[in-house]
Image: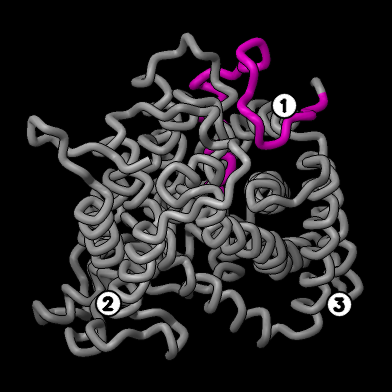
Amino acid sequence: MAFDAHGIEPIPTEHRDSTPWEQFWIWSGANIAPINWVLGALGVTLGLSLAETLAVIALGNLVGCAVFGLFNVIGHRTGVNQMVLGRAPFGRRGAIVPGVVQCLVSMGWVGVNTWVVLDLVMAVLRQFGVHGGTGMKYLIAAIIMVVQLGLALYGFYAIRTFEKYTVPATVLVMAVMTVLALSQADLNWTAATATEPADKLTAITQLLTAIGIGWGITWLPYSADYSRFVRPGASAKSVFWGCALGMYVPTVWLAALGACLASTGGSTDPSALVVGAFGAMALPVLLLIMHGPVATNILNLYSCSLAALSIGIKAARWQVTLVAGVVASAVLVVFVQAEDFARAFDHWLVSILVWISPWASIVLVDFFLLRKGKIVVTDLYEESSSVNGRALVSLGAGLVAGWAWQYGTVPLMQGPLAKALGNTDFSWFSGALVAGVLYYVLCGERTPDGRRRAVT
């Protein structure tokens, strides 16, 4: 593996040797995570039947993962990372705002993703007669953090190799787990507690936001960071399908498994799900669980460093990654000491992801509608103080619209429109619609023949 010395500059053609198939493994690894079992079970918990839950998960992810595939196509076409691409609509200085948010959010996820699996690991270890308290948690957390930070420091080529050779093995474990769990489960396909149409609609919208359409959207700020390494000769179609399916397959698979287990009437607690359903496979499940945060967090750490560089920090990419890893480790120590705070932080972090859909809508409108899929890459790196105020106004309006129709777990992030309409959650849609339409209206000038063109 070569050391990845690249920062946020465009990747030279001779260094772009990744394939769409390798992108599939990268995104599959990032989404083989225990949290998807729990989010899949959420549909049943909210009152939907198993059949309804599976339909929402499968159809919703078609939309979310398709948008994700489009963002990867942009990265492949330009060879530029995602937050630098955001300079096109927002301007060099205007892009600092979403860049800072992405940097902080991705760093926060490193701590959260590591923390959430510790109880799972402890539960599985008890199957082997290994018992321990806080000290054992610190040891497990340290092992996970060292591995994921080492891979992220080495960069893209190490990430690609890790996912390429470990994910197929985890897929095999998942397949055996699925057969074992379903063979023991007495599935109830039609039982539902949400019988009224209004209650059913509320449950569907909340599930769409958590693990349906909203899941693919949450990964959009990361996408081009990896597809920029795909060889230029690869077709846009192959990049789209490699990335979209890499997101879709494991997300739907694990979420469906969680929903099936929840439909049997058992606990939806992840520890209970793992130990109760997979006790006979404790060792491979333990490896799968520990693989999950590593496969996800190496992307968080790597993309965090690129976001930091995109806002103007002058340092080598690996140095920024190291700082992000140290900060995330300190956050993790706090989480282990204060479980209630960690849980509250997790809920808050999920709630603030409402910023992604309006930002993503602006980026898509700018690239595909106003610029017709063409960006002058050198313009993204010009030293200037440019700020596209119209993009920031559109982003602000989209944030307000998204918050108004968001029903998050944090009371502050429960908007008036969401509560007025039966606790429904269409934040991803309202934010994207308002921001995208407003940006198109504000930033499109008409040429003499009546067509719109982007304001540069």
| Label at residue 405 | 2
| Label at residue 372 | none
Q: Nearer the viewer, mark 1 or mark 3?
A: 1
Q: Residue at x 79, y 29 (%)?
A: 5
Give the residues drawn in magenta, as a range. 3-32
Label 2, label 1: how far apart the Cα atoms are:
40 Å
Residue 239 horizontal/vertical position (percent): 43, 24
Q: Residue at x 61, y 27 (%)?
A: 10
Q: Is residue 114 above or below residue 119?
A: above
Q: Secondary structure at mark 1?
A: helix
| Residue tagged 3 | 134
Q: Secondary structure at mark 2?
A: loop
Q: Earlier in the sequence, mark 3 or mark 2?
A: 3
* Viewport quadrant of the C terminus: top left
Q: Residue at x 47, y 66 (%)?
A: 353
Neighbor class of circle 2 (other Cα within 10 Å; few <14, some 14-19, many 20+) is many
Q: Earlier in the sequence, mark 2 or mark 1?
A: 1
Q: Nearer the viewer, residue 145 or 190?
A: 145
Mark 3 and mark 2 in contact? Answer it, CB < 8 Å.
Answer: no
Determine whether, in the image, residue 314 is placed left or right of residue 57: right
Indicate the amino acid at tag 1: Tyr
Can you name the residue that lies furthest to the front here? 448
